[in-house]
Structures are given as C-alpha cells and as structure tokens.
Image (cartoon, grey):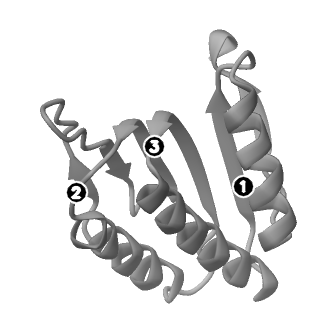
Amino acid sequence: MRNLKIEAVEDEFYIPSVDFDATTGICELSGESYIEQTDEFYEPLLDWLREYMSLPGKSITFNLRLAYYNTSTSKKLLDILQLLKLHQQKGFKVTFNWFFDTEDVDIEEDIDDFREITGLNINMIDNSIS
C-alpha cells in the first residue's frame, strides 16, 4: 500500500496538507480546509483509510491540525471520525489527536460535538505546545 501525500494549496479555496503513512499508520491532516469540491478532495482520503484499515492488525494515529475548516469539511471530518470509531470497535488501536488553539472556543465546541456524536476519544492538544 502506498502513502498518500498532498501538498497544501492556499489560493481562493484552501486545500489542506495530507500525509498518510501506510508503514507507521500515522495520518496527518493540516492547514486550512475550505474547498469548493469537498467530496472530490476527501473521498480519496476516506478510500485510503478504508483500504489501510482492511489490512490485518493495523493500528492508526490520526493527527488533525486544521486551523480552519468550513461546514462541508466538517461533514467529511465526521465521516473520518466515524470510520475510525468502527475500526476501534473491531478491536484495533485508534488514537485521534486534535491540535488546536485553546483560545478558539468554536473548535473546542466542535470537538465536544464530534466526541458526543461518534463516541470516539479525541485527545485535545494545545497547538502552542506541539
């Protein structure tokens, strides 16, 4: 299985950086995400995660470092979290680290909402210490 890497693009619509490593199981999404074609961007990421999770004995660490994301991205983040929760329910180790600015109360509320909806443990990490 190949790694998935996408360089961030900052233009009219911001595309986040993607670094999914098939060897280590460490997946990172960082930057800003307000994309016009959200499905077109995120479906390959979800497909990659599904393929990775279909391999035997694969734990995963997902590091989310989005400084900003739009509503359509939020829906795709929920899809990612639900996929990770299913993987965890199958007995695999899943770690989800959400790096954020602790002064951003909106993101903190989003994290709480995602936790409640998915039941997945989300480690909230102060971005200033990472």
SS label for mark 2: loop
Q: Residue at x 73, y 15 (%)?
A: 103
Residue 45 seen in this snapshot: yes
Image depth: mark 1 or mark 2 in front: 2
Drawn side of residue 129 relative to residue 12, left or right: right
Measure the C-alpha gap from mark 1 to mark 2. 29 Å
Q: Residues within 10 Å of mark 2 (few under 14, many from 20)?
A: some
Q: Is residue 51 above or below residue 106?
A: below
Task: Indicate the position of residue 104 as horizontal and vertical percent values.
Answer: 68, 23
Q: Is residue 42 above or below residue 125?
A: below
**Which three-letter amino acid code belongs to the residue tagged 3?**
Tyr
Q: Which residue is mark 1?
A: 95
Task: Indicate the position of residue 106 as horizontal and vertical percent values.
Answer: 70, 34
Q: Residue 36: which disc?
A: 2
**Which three-letter amino acid code belongs to the residue tagged 2?**
Glu
Task: Indicate the position of residue 56 as horizontal and vertical percent values.
Answer: 56, 87
Q: Residue at x 73, y 75 (%)?
A: 85
Q: Which residue is mark 3?
A: 69
